[in-house]
Structures are given as C-alpha cells and as structure tokens.
Amino acid sequence: MIPLCRRSATPPAQGRRPSAIKVLAAGLAIPLVAALGGCHSKRLQPMLRPLEGTLYIAVGVSQEALDTELQKEVRQRTALLQASFRTLQPKVRLQVQVFPEENIRNELLIRNRTGLSPDLLLVNESTARDLAREKLINTVSFPAAVLAQLDAGSVLRVRRSDGTVTGLPLELQPQVACFDRRRVRRSPATLEELLAFSAKGMEVGISLDAISLAWTLGPLGAIEAVGSLLAGEPATPETRQSLLGWLQWLRAADQQQHVTVYPTETELLKELMVGALDWIPCRSIHITRLRSRLGRNLGVAPLPSGTFGTASPITRERVLAFGVNSSPVQRQLALALARFAISPLHQRDMVLRNQYVLPVNRQVAPPVHSSSVVAAMVEGQEQSLQHTTIRLVEGSSKSLREAWQALLTRFLFDDLSHQDTLKGLIELLGAERSR
Amino acid sequence: MNLLLMEIAGWFGYLQRLEVRVQVILLLLVFLGQGALRQRLAPRFPLAGRPSVMIPSLLGLLSLALGLAHQPWGLVLLGLLLYLGWLGLGGVRQVLGRFIQHQQLQLLETRLIRPAYLLVSVLLVIRVFDNPQDLALIPIGEWFGSEVTLGSLFLAMLTLYVLAMGTGPPSQGVAWLVQRSVGISNGSRRALALMIRYTAVAFGIVWALDHVGFNRTAILAVAGGLSVGLGFGIKEVFSNFVSGLWLLFEGSVRPGEVLFIEGDPCEVRSLGLRAAVLWRDRDNAELVIPNQTFFTNTTVTYTGSDTMRRSQVLVSAAYHHDPVEVIALLEATARSQSRILPTPAPKGLLLHYGDSSIDYALRFWIANPMDNVSICSEVQAGIWRAFRDRDIEIPFPQQVQYQVEGPPKS
C-alpha cells in the first residue's frame, strides 16, 4: 500500500522551493491561459471583426540624443498615430520601445532568437537596408498602387531586386539652419557670409559628425571627391585638391573666435537652447524641441551655399521595416498601420501638426507658402536631391564615421597637418568600399 | 506611473505569438513537471533524481530541439542560464567561505549576493521583453519640484541599498589599514569602521537626492517641517541615533568595550543606529540596550583608558595565625596564578577583626575584565590549598547557646 502522506517527509526547507516555483508558474500561466482564451474567442468572431492586439514598434534614434525629452516626443507622436489609427482598428494598442539606432542590429540578433522582435521598426533607410541584408527583418511587398503614391526616389532606395521593399518610406527629415532670431536677423546665405557674421559676433556651432557636416562638402566642391573615394575610385590630383580646399575652410572656420566645433549634433542643440550658440545646422525633427524652448525666437532657413554650389545636406529617410516574429494578426496589423501611416490623411496630418518632417506621399503638398519653416525644409530636401552622391556618406559604416570624427578632431587641434589629414581621409574613405 | 503600468501590461501582448507561447509553456512544464519526472527516473538513474541535474538537462535539450527546428529558443535558454547562475551562487559561497567568517558570509549572501543576483535576473528578463534604457526614462511623477524618472529613482535606491548593506567589509578593511599604520586599539578600529560606513551612507543619501534631481530648497523646507515632526513623533528613535553617533565619537561605548551592566561585565558587540548589543558572559545572553541609556545614565567601564581590572577575593583565617604570615601566603598564592598580572603586584590586606576570624582581602590585577569570575575562582581554590598545606584554619562562626531555665519564681 502506498502511503498517502509520503510528501510530508520532505523537510520544510526543501518544501518551500517547489511552492515558490508554483507561485511563479501560476503568475506566468494566468496571462498565458488568458491569451489562449483570447485566441479561441477570436476564431468565433465574424471575419469582418476589426483586428485586435498589441503592436510592438521599435524606434531608432541616435544614441547621444536619447533622453527623457526625446522619449516624450516619440511617445507623443506614437500616441497621435495610435489615436488616428484607432478610427480604423479600435482595438489595437501600440507599444513603443526607443533604441539607439546603432544598437538595433544587436537588439534584433537577440530578440529574433527569443521570438520577441518588434512588429515594426521606424529606422533610417540605410539601417533598414543593412538589417534586410542580414535577414534580421522581413522584406515585404506592397501593391504597385501603394508604392506609386510615394516619392519615387525613396521607393527606389528601399526596393530590392526581387520586387520586395526593405521597408515602407514614411517621412523625410531634411537638414536646415536653426538660429536664434534675437541674435541673428537673417541666416547667412553663403559660407563667406557665415564667417563674416561670426566675425561680427554670431556664435556658430558646427558638428564634426560626418552626417551632420556633409552639408559643407557641396559649397566647398569636395562632394564629388568624397563620393568617388567612397565608391572605391582611386584618388586623383583633383580629388586631393578639392579635399584640401575643404580642410582649409574647416581650419579657417575653427580659427574664428566665434565658431565652435562640437562632436555631435546633440551638443549643438543644447547650446542653442541655452543661448551659448546663435546659429547651427540642425535636423528638422529637432525643431519641435528647439521651438519649445526658444518659441518665436527660433529661426529656420536653408543651409548656406558656396562658390561651388548649394549646400549638400543629408535628408534622413525614415522607413517602417517589418520584424520577423510577428503573429499573423500582428503582421496584418503592421501592414495596415504602415499603409495608414503613408496615407494622404495621416501624412497631411503629420505635416499640419508641426511635426517638422516632410511627407513621402506625393499627393500631399507641403505648405511652403504658409510656413517659412516648411519652405526651408523643402529647400533642404531639394539640396539633398541635387547631390545624390551625398547618400554614400549616409550609408557609411559607424566605424568610418567615428574614425572621420577622430581624424578631423586631431586636425583641428593641430595634432595633424593638412597633408597627413588628407592622406588619412583618403585612406579612410577608400577603405570603406572594401568593407 | 500609468505609463509604467501600461508598459508592463503591454509585455503580455507577446503571448499573441505562438513561438513565445511554446517557450513559456515549455518553461512551465520543466519547472512544474520535473518533480514527477525525477521520481520516476531516480531509481534507474540516481543523478536524474537531483533537480540541479534534471532542470538544466531538460532546458538544454529543449533549447537544442527548438534551435534544430529553426524555432525561437532564446527564452528557454535564458531560463537555463538563470537557473545555472542560481546554482553557481552555491559555489561562490564556498569560495568566499574560505576568506570570510560564517556569520558575515551569511549576511553578505542574504543581503547582497542573492538580492543582487535576483536583480540582475529581473533586469535580464526585462531586457528581453523591453528596453531598460528606455524604461529608465519613464517619468513616474513630480516630487519636490523636479520630474523623477524611473531610472534615476531606481539607481538612487540601489546605490543606497548597496551602500547600507555592502559598505561593511570595505570600511572594516580601511579601518584595519589605519590600525596597522597608526596603531589604534581594536575598539577604536571598530568605531572607525562604523564611522566610515555611516559617512559613506550619508554621502550616498546626499548623492541619491541630487541624482534624482530633487529641488534642494524644497528638501530643506520639508526637512524643517520634518524636524518638528521628529520632535514629537519619533524623537526616541532620533535621540537613539544621535546618541549612538555621539557615543562613537566620544569613544565610551564602542564595539569591544567592556561595560558593567546590572552587576555583570558585558562586552559591546555592536553599536547600531538605535541600540547597542552587549554580550553577557555569565549566561551567553545578548542585551539590546537603546543608545540613549548610555547617554543619560552612568556607565561603568573597564576599558576606558586601559583594559585592566583590579579584582579581589575575601578570605578569613583563625585568630591564632600570624597576620603577616597569612598576608605573605595570600600574595604568594596570587603571584603563582598565571592569569594574574605581576604588576601592579598582588596585595594582601587585613580588613578587620571579625567575631570568629580575622578577615583578609587579596587584591590583584587581571588583563581581561571578562575573565574576572573564572580567575577569582582559581585564586580562591589556590588559597584553600595553600591554607591546607600550612595548616591555616579557615574558621566558621561558632555560637554557644545557653538555655535559661524559665523566669525566676516570684
């Protein structure tokens, strides 16, 4: 006969552990059963029933810019999107996670293996391309009619040879000049004017980050040189000459009393907000934050041109990419949300609500006549389109950008001569192709 | 706060995914079903009867199977790693046990190592479900005029906890170094260690308030209001705390000191924020005495300027013995005891003439006040033997009673 109370022989100390495990297990089991129950009930609903569920969205932002303020902005924008989208799908909930854009690859490497990858990723076009190459996101196909609504250049960049896209273009973030109207009446139109204004006391801030500094390559005639080196072409005397000219301008600007060089764009923003700087190049998405601090004193204008042409700013293209672990319902929701986000309704709403991005939907015309800020953004976008090779800088690796910054810092601190910096720059840009 | 709760509630949305549900179910099955499986397998394979073998094996096999089937396996692997880490803490305990005393190791393990491991585990799980860096930026309210984020509050609390619990060994190490270099006493070393610890915690509190970003003016205003509250409400607690600090600086009640409490010598074991813990040799009792008591009452200490104690035993000898001879014998007996200090020399004294004997006292000095009772016992036993060898009589009171035969007849 088997004794009924056999378990009672277990010492009390040992008996505690299984009970703790049971409590933990019960904690996990309750939501699990609830989820299973939810699945069961869904099958009983009519087919026309709206989709229901949680959609996980990962938003990539630059590492140094990630703070409470930015997180608030991202959440507010998502809340607006959720509110609009709920008119179509009332039972959907968006859960946002903000990650440094540089870490998204590593995040996905971990999350894809756990089944917890986001359903949608709002990232730069170049990031989406890299992630798709490593199969860390799913490429998707959209009907031609959907893609036909969008900016042709943006679609071209996300389209793959098999007809799928790495992500759906959502918005454009051009680079413009931001300044404090109390100190600067008019933004300089040329680089000569920029130095002349700074000589008269205008505090100018410039970032050495490759993406942020690329706008100076066009006016100084170095853009083709950088583009050809990044494309793997050998350095020619013309290439050297144009790069040398660009370096000389940088040195001359740095030697101005009222021109200060900073490592990243985030520092520029902070300094402009506290009044330490009067004029900076800035990305349009940051105008919201600047405006909250400077109010009507914030001025926005196109970046200055130069002897060799207009400014060559990089316009960030933000795309919605698709994760690999979504459930069928979540995938349906993600596709529906993406299509909603590029619809004229939402794109117009996005521009009119002063989110300071440009629409990718061609049916939405930015209100350039009613807003000087939007006009400056549109001009910034047009400047980008004039210098297509500038996109090679945007697509460059993080290590190249870090090495670029380190090299220019040493140069501006007189640690490297013009010739040594030029040699280093050519090696650096040339090596990117082989990488 | 709502944002945080909604964020946490949102994690359960992952259960919409089949791959996640499968992993969670497998984890539940392993942890809940391993007991039954062990009971079945144990008779055949004794090793399988141990959970520390069965659980990792099952989780490892399941991870492998999911991986081979090209299914997500990260959650099962995470469960395996966390369980192995928990088992590994046993090894850490064994290694530390070689260098740290059992009692201290117990405290270190229960208050620092295991909580730290649990915290890391929770953060790892959150790291998989969410972005801790992102969560840290969630504002949880506006306190004292500044917006407090989850991350800053968590970091401040964690720092305080680690300082309160983990600064013991480092501060003792610093105090030991000071003792080696300056030559302070053991009591001073312990007091120094405690003061270093209090200082670290105090700086930690200031740093934590600053890190969270509390408005200093608001804190001062609140502190002003609180001081009134302290005066009425918890003044005893506060009084004990301040008394403890004062006593530490004064040096009269420090760990290692010997105090006379209710007629018994007691050694101070620790001086806490509220009370001091003293050990009584007589019955191995620990007395928890509020610090304020030492601050307001007279305290008898044997370890104020030195640790020596002057002790004495009383003895009687019969009238027919020469007092000089008896005193010499008493002093010689004391000198022969190893635990009695040679200097100051033991001193025999004739105290007074009693009813049936002459009463003597033997006074001597001992190094450790806590040994008084046992040394007195040894000395008295030695005196008995010495008196017996010299035929010195220890008289006992004799009384002759005469019976009166009733009242006189009238």
Image: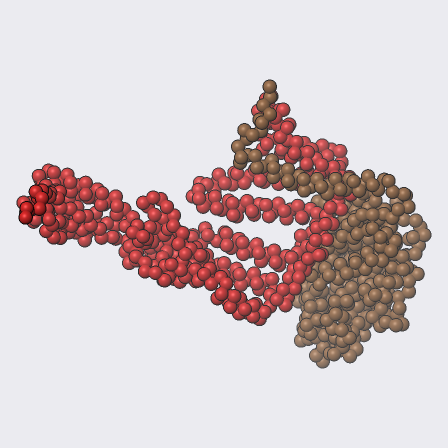
Q: Is residue A264 above or below residue B323?
A: below
Chain A shade in the render: brown
Q: Is residue A148 left or right of residue A251?
A: right
User: Residue at 15% across / 44% down in the picture?
Assistant: B333
**What is the basis of the colouring in this image?**
by chain
Residue at the far top: name it. Answer: A1
Q: Is residue B233 above or below residue A231?
A: below
Residue B23's quadrant in the figure? top right
Residue A12 percent location from the top left of the image: 53, 35
Residue at the far front: name it. Answer: B410
Foreground residue among B137 and A433: B137
Foreground residue among B218 and A61: B218
Residue at the far bottom: name it. Answer: A200
Viewer can see residue A342 = yes
Residue at the far right: name it. Answer: A145
User: Residue at 73% across / 33% down in the picture?
Assistant: B68
Residue A425 percent location from the top left of the image: 71, 59
Foreground residue among A240 and A387: A387
User: Residue at 62% across / 38% down in the picture?
Assistant: A21
Residue A386 percent location from the top left of the image: 86, 64
Foreground residue among A61 and B212: B212
Viewer can see residue A134 = no
Residue B55's quadrant in the figure? top right
Residue B293's quadrant in the figure? bottom left
Q: Is residue A200 left or right of residue B88?
A: right
Q: Is residue A351 left or right of residue B236?
A: right
User: Residue at 56% across / 68% down in the picture?
Assistant: B222
Chain B shade in the render: red
Image label count:
0
Quadrant in which the N terminus of chain A is drawn: top right
Residue A173 percent location from the top left of the image: 81, 62
